[in-house]
Image (cartoon, grey):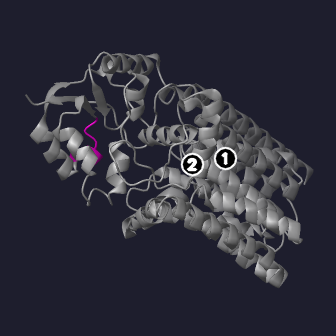
């Protein structure tokens, strides 16, 4: 046994620690330059920034579609916090990216605390936390971007951390408060709240009311207030439009077999074995039911559903994998604590699965750090816009117009989505601006939001003409998610 321990226990743990440290450093050296990059890395960042700037300026967000602004379908908490940070730090991507970056690091710390507390093994806690940061590529390089996802995952982790151990009324009320914050970051938090409520009912029976009633009251009353303040536009954007994405069977199959069982294969493998009561090296493994840490299976199941709904919906990108990946990072903990007796072989298996997951998430950081060329091309585009007499419509990147001293307009992607995927009419004021040649220049990325909108294309072709293709030196890419970058310039027809 002593020889087995030396061979399979220490070397595997040391290698897992080394790999964990490597991927933490890899994330930090990749993400920090992105935090301070002055232009959008994902086109949704641009419209989220404009939304927070409106909040900082005291302007309404949930309004009827119009030429000046169109909100996203996300709940308002992230934009509100972003607006408060912009008031202090100024209007740029940096405050909102720092918010997401901080939320990412806090989530990693929470995962460490949870796993270390349950296993009493620091190396497992360290590996679980590093696995989360090591999922950077798997979840689409969205961790520190100006989007709601990282704050959402952090609040879910805090809410489940409080709620799964809740027995007293104060702790249940705290869980309800945090879950409410998560809901007003992203609507699908209601799935976690429902799963937590069901789990609590089976464990503490009717004391669950200390969670359910406050959560329902906080959510319901706040929705009613926001809806009344916006003449119903809050509900329209965050529920009517947000709930209109259909789910496709092919995307469901891809989510289960490609995203989870393959892309997150190392973590999924440990969880499947933990759930199957299999023999591992001759040792029978039985997961205790409704005992620590098995209660985290409730959170993992809820995350699987939430990520599945987002990923399987038409247009659902890989950022939707962040909840399921984050909670699956607790799989080594569940697998380790579920055993009646620890063994060197079992420990070696956990370390091997951890290393396998890191390999699945490997990436070259140089490909994802913004280059000086990208920054220079953005600078040149801003100078071109600033040198143009009159207003300029940068259809996918209104922040470029703002940087050039022009009046920003509604992002065309948000406008397309808020019109039920381009099936309803363009706002009247937007149509009049195009017909009256309000814009001296229009810059298009020729993205699907622009090209596939037949009404927009007809309106443009009747009133504007393409004059040039933008050179690469003035065309900064937004490479995360769907790649877009400025491509063509329109000017009014004479």
Measured as percent of width and height from the top left, residue 303 is found at: 61, 63
- The residue that disc 2 covers is 148
Quadrant where the C terminus is found in the figure: top left
Q: In which quarter of the image is residue 294?
A: bottom right
Vertical relation: 471 (above or below) 56 = above
Front residue (pair 157, 259): 157
Magenta highlight range: 445-451
Q: In which quarter of the image is residue 168?
A: bottom right
User: Is residue 448 visible to the viewer in this orientation of the structure?
Assistant: no
- The residue that disc 1 covers is 132
Measured as percent of width and height from the top left, residue 120 is found at: 89, 53
Vertical relation: 376 (above or below) 392 = above
Vertical relation: 184 (above or below) 243 = above
Q: Does the magenta stretch include residue 21?
A: no
| Residue shown at the point (39%, 66%) measured from the top left | 244
Front residue (pair 231, 115): 231
Measured as percent of width and height from the top left, residue 359 is found at: 59, 43
């Amino acid at each position: 046994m002593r020889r087995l321990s030396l061979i399979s226990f220490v070397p595997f743990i040391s290698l897992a620690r080394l790999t964990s440290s490597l991927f933490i450093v890899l994330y930090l050296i990749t993400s920090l330059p992105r935090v301070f990059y002055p232009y959008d890395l994902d086109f949704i960042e641009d419209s989220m920034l404009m939304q927070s700037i409106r909040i900082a300026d005291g302007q309404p967000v949930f309004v009827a579609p119009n030429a000046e602004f169109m909100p996203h379908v996300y709940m308002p908490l992230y934009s509100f916090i972003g607006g408060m940070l912009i008031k202090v730090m100024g209007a740029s991507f940096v405050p909102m990216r720092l918010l997401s970056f901080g939320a990412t690091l806090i989530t990693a710390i929470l995962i460490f605390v949870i796993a270390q507390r349950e296993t009493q093994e620091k190396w497992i806690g360290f590996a679980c936390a590093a696995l989360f940061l090591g999922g950077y590529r798997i979840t689409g390089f969205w961790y520190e971007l100006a989007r709601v996802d990282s704050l959402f995952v952090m609040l879910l982790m805090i809410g489940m951390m409080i709620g799964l151990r809740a027995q007293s009324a104060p702790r249940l009320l705290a869980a309800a408060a945090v879950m409410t914050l998560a809901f007003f970051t992203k609507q699908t938090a209601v799935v976690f709240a429902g799963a937590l409520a069901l789990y609590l009912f089976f464990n503490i029976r009717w004391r669950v009311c200390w969670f359910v009633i406050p959560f329902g009251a906080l959510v319901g009353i706040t929705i009613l207030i926001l809806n009344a303040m916006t003449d119903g536009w809050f509900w329209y954007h965050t529920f009517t439009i947000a709930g209109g994405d259909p789910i496709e069977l092919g995307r469901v199959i891809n989510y289960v077999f490609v995203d989870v069982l393959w892309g997150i294969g190392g973590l999924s493998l440990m969880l499947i074995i933990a759930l199957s009561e299999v023999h591992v090296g001759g040792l029978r493994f039985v997961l205790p039911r409704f005992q620590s840490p098995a209660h985290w299976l409730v959170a993992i199941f809820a995350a699987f559903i939430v990520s599945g709904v987002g990923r399987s919906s038409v247009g659902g990108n890989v950022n939707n994998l962040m909840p399921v990946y984050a909670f699956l990072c607790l799989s080594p903990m569940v697998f380790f604590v579920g055993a009646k007796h620890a063994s060197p072989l079992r420990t070696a298996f956990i370390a091997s699965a951890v290393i396998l997951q890191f390999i699945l998430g490997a990436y070259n950081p140089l490909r994802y750090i913004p280059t000086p060329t990208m920054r220079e091309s953005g600078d040149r585009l801003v100078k071109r816009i600033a040198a143009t007499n009159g207003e300029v419509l940068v259809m996918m990147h209104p922040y470029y117009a703002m940087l050039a001293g022009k009046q920003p307009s509604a992002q065309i992607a948000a406008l397309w989505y808020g019109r039920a995927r381009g099936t309803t009419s363009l706002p009247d004021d937007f149509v009049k601006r195009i017909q009256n040649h309000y814009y001296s220049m229009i810059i298009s990325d020729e993205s699907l939001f622009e090209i596939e909108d037949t009404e927009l294309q007809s309106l443009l072709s009747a009133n504007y003409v393409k004059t040039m293709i933008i050179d690469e030196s003035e065309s900064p890419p937004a490479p995360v998610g769907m790649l877009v970058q400025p491509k063509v310039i329109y000017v009014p027809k004479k």
